Structures are given as structure tokens and as C-alpha cells.
Image: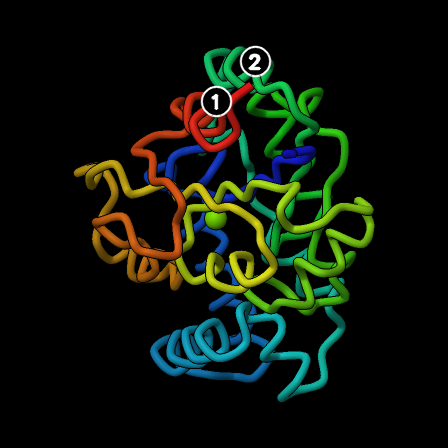
């Protein structure tokens, strides 16, 4: 029986075309440039390698270079969320129909998650936020990240459904018995410049078609309640 729905935050609860993650990605690159005195291209390559190899840029910085994680998190998330995302009453109504406890599981930090949830107007739909600090920086897709969340919820994998936009976060969740719903990219927004997309490593991780690691795929987050109903009929 399903008890919990684990929601990814960034580019899952709001559209990938918002430009928020590219803006954060730019700040990650700027941080690397300034801290280690790197050229922009070198900083971007490093950012990409860390993201691919360790799950987040921060994890790479922590393992390969000494860094204060909180200083980095504060710096990269210092963006005006309201410039990128809008209150979403439709999403709030749909979340309210889901008859299970909903929690956030994010590789960002809790203050960023709180700002995003508050801006969307959906904070009251989520009972807990499991962030990168909770995961002790062992972030998705590490299996340990999911194990930590399951332990905190006192839940088995098969009592949870994960909602994600990043395909690489699915296999380890599936290994633990968690069912997965993947949000596919809903077309490219011509307003978002390709160069800005390139600055966001996560943008390289969005398949056009439903992969085998997803139990179900949806085109937009507004289909999430229906998808959960399909996987866990009541
Ligand atoms: Mg995401």
C-alpha cells in the first residue's frame, strides 16, 4: 500500500523552461571561477564533470577540494525565485487531491525549497523537506539518499512513489522498490536561449521518451494526481 509520495523540487514542481535552474547553474559556475580563479569554460567543464561524476557540483567540490558546503549553498541559491516562477493555484488544487502524505526530496537545500514552495503557493501540501543537508551531501541518485529518506519516514520502498524530472535519479529508487513517475520535457520554450540551457548540466538529463526505469511518464506536472491514481488505485 502506498503511504508517501516523494516529490523532486526543481524543474518538477515548476516548468524547466522557467530559467531558474540555469540561473543557479550560472552562479555555480561563477562560484568556481572566483574561488579557484578559473576561466568560464574551464569552470563550466568542472561543474559538468562534478555533476556527472558525483550527482551534484557540491559533492565534487567536497570530495576533491575543501569547501564549506553551507557557503556554497547560500551563494548558488542567492537568486530571486519570484523572477522565474509564479504562484500556481492549479498545481495546488491538484496536489490537494492526492490522498497520500507528500514530502519533498531535493538535492538543493531546505531554504531554497521553502522559497520555491512559498512562491508556488503549495508549501502547505508538503509535510517534510528532505534536502541535501539531511542526506549529508550524499545526494540523489545515490542509493543512500533514498535509504535515508525511507528510514526517516519509517517506510519501505514499495510504500512510496517518486516524482522526478531527472531520469538518472530513477534506477536507484527502483532498486529499493520505489515506483517512479518521470516528468518528460514538454517541448522547448523558444524564449529560453540555448546558451542558457547549456549552462545547466541538468538540462542534459531529460529524455524525450519514457525510459524503462520509469513506471509511468507524464508530460506536465498537472497530470501527477492521475498518474498516482493509475499506479495506486484506491
Ligand atoms: Mg529536478
The number of numbered badges drawn on the structure is 2
Which of 200/107 is in front?
Answer: 107
Q: Which residue is mark 2?
A: 97
Q: Which residue does the image show at 22% across and 49% down from the upper left?
A: 209
**In the picture, residue 48 is in which quadrant?**
bottom left
| Residue 20 appears left or right of 69 | left
Q: Position of residue 55 (x, y in %)?
A: 53, 69
Classify 24 as above or below 123. Answer: below
**In the picture, residue 146 is in which quadrant?**
bottom right
| Residue 155 appears left or right of 47 | right
Q: Residue furthest left?
A: 190
Q: Position of residue 195 (x, y in %)?
A: 24, 58
The circle drawn on residue 206 is: none
| Residue 115 appears left or right of 215 | right
Q: Which residue does the image show at 70% across and 28% down from the upper left?
A: 101
Q: Which residue does the image show at 48% across and 71% down from the upper left?
A: 51
Classify 100 as above or below 65. Answer: above
Asked whether the beta carbons under mark 1 and mark 2 sit within 8 Å of each other, the answer is yes
Q: SS of the residue at dot 2? A: loop
**In the picture, residue 153 is in which quadrant?**
top right
Mark 1 / mark 2, whichever is N-terminal? 2
Q: SS of the residue at dot 1? A: helix
Q: Position of residue 56 (x, y in %)?
A: 55, 68
Amino acid at each position: 500500500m502506498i503511504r508517501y509520495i516523494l516529490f523532486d523540487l526543481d524543474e518538477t514542481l515548476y516548468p524547466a523552461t522557467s530559467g531558474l535552474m540555469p540561473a543557479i547553474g550560472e552562479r555555480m559556475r561563477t562560484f568556481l571561477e572566483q574561488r579557484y580563479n578559473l576561466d568560464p569554460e574551464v569552470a563550466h567543464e568542472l561543474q559538468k564533470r562534478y555533476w556527472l561524476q558525483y550527482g551534484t557540483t557540491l559533492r565534487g567540490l567536497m570530495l576533491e577540494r575543501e569547501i564549506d558546503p553551507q557557503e556554497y549553498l547560500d551563494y548558488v541559491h542567492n537568486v530571486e525565485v519570484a523572477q522565474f516562477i509564479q504562484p500556481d493555484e492549479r498545481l495546488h488544487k491538484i496536489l490537494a487531491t492526492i490522498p497520500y502524505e507528500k514530502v519533498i526530496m531535493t538535492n538543493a537545500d531546505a531554504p531554497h525549497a521553502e522559497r520555491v514552495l512559498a512562491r508556488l503557493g503549495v508549501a502547505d501540501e508538503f509535510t517534510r523537506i528532505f534536502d541535501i543537508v539531511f542526506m549529508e551531501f550524499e545526494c540523489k541518485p545515490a542509493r543512500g539518499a533514498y535509504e535515508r529518506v525511507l528510514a526517516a519516514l519509517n517506510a519501505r520502498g514499495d510504500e512510496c512513489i517518486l516524482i522526478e524530472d531527472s531520469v538518472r535519479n530513477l534506477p536507484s529508487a527502483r532498486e529499493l522498490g520505489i515506483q517512479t513517475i518521470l516528468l518528460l520535457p514538454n517541448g522547448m520554450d523558444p524564449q529560453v536561449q540555448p546558451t542558457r540551457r547549456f549552462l545547466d548540466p541538468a538540462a542534459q538529463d531529460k529524455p524525450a521518451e519514457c525510459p524503462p526505469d520509469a513506471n509511468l511518464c507524464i508530460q506536465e506536472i498537472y497530470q501527477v494526481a492521475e498518474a498516482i491514481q493509475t499506479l495506486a488505485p484506491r
